[in-house]
Amino acid sequence: MSNPFFDQPILNSPYKEPERHWELDETGQPTQQIKAFRRPAKFITPIPKPKKRGPRQTNLFESAAVKALSASDQQYEELTGLINSLRQHLEEWRALPEKDWKVTAETARLLKHWRHHQFS
């Protein structure tokens, strides 16, 4: 039996902002459905243990999912906000007209090439 997720795992060009993605269920498994927008970033990373013990610092980023993963021996942090914020700023910058780029002439030449060249 054919599995579309594994037959065609890459849906987007590496030269453009992603426009669609494979939907994943709550356990991270593919549902075989393609969604017509960029997948929001959601990363949970381990926080290294301090070498010296001191008073515990309050964590500003704890969500229910991060709390469920974290234990006394290993803490985790969610990086979703930072990455999605960066993506939003990049989208706004991409929408700027060329005269407002505020880059060197050589950088402008390269950006024009990358934006308009028909890569194979």
Image (cartoon, grey):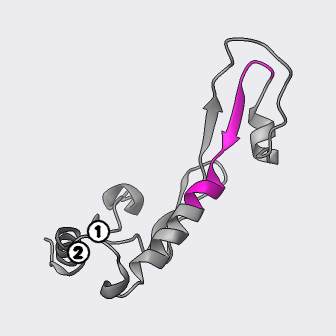
Quadrant in the picture for residue 10: bottom left
Residue 17 seen by the camera: yes
Residue drawn at 80 percent across, 39 percent down: 59
The residue under label 2 is: 108
* Mark 1: few/some/many CA within 10 Å (<14, 14-19, 20+): few
Q: Is residue 16 above or below residue 47?
A: below
Query: Which one is earlier in the sequence, the residue at label 1 or at label 2?
Result: 1
Q: Specify the quadrant that holds the C terminus.
A: bottom left
Image check: 45 left or right of 117?
right
Q: Which residues lie in the magenta part? A: 72-84
Q: Which quarter of the rendered picture does the N terminus lie within?
A: bottom left
Q: As drawn, is 73 to the left or to the right of 114?
A: right
- Residue located 46% across and 67% down the image: 21
Confirm whether the magenta stretch covers residue 80.
Answer: yes
* SS assignment at label 1: loop
Give the residue at x 41% y 70%. Answer: 18
Query: Where residue 98 sits: x, y (%)?
Result: 31, 85
Q: Confirm whether the magenta stretch covers residue 46.
A: no
Q: Position of residue 33 (x, y in %)?
A: 51, 69
Asked if residue 96 lies left or right of residue 104, the reply is right
* 93, 100: nearer the viewer: 100
Q: Quadrant of residue 93?
A: bottom left
Q: Position of residue 119 (x, y in %)?
A: 15, 72
Instruction: Count neighbours of disc 2 (C-alpha within 10 A) and say few if under 14, some if 14 to 19, many if 20 or more.
Output: some
Closest to the observer: 19 or 97? 97
Residue receiving disc 1: 13
The residue type indicated by label 2 comes to: Ala
Distance CA(mark 1)–CA(mark 2): 22 Å
**Residue 78 has which mark?**
none
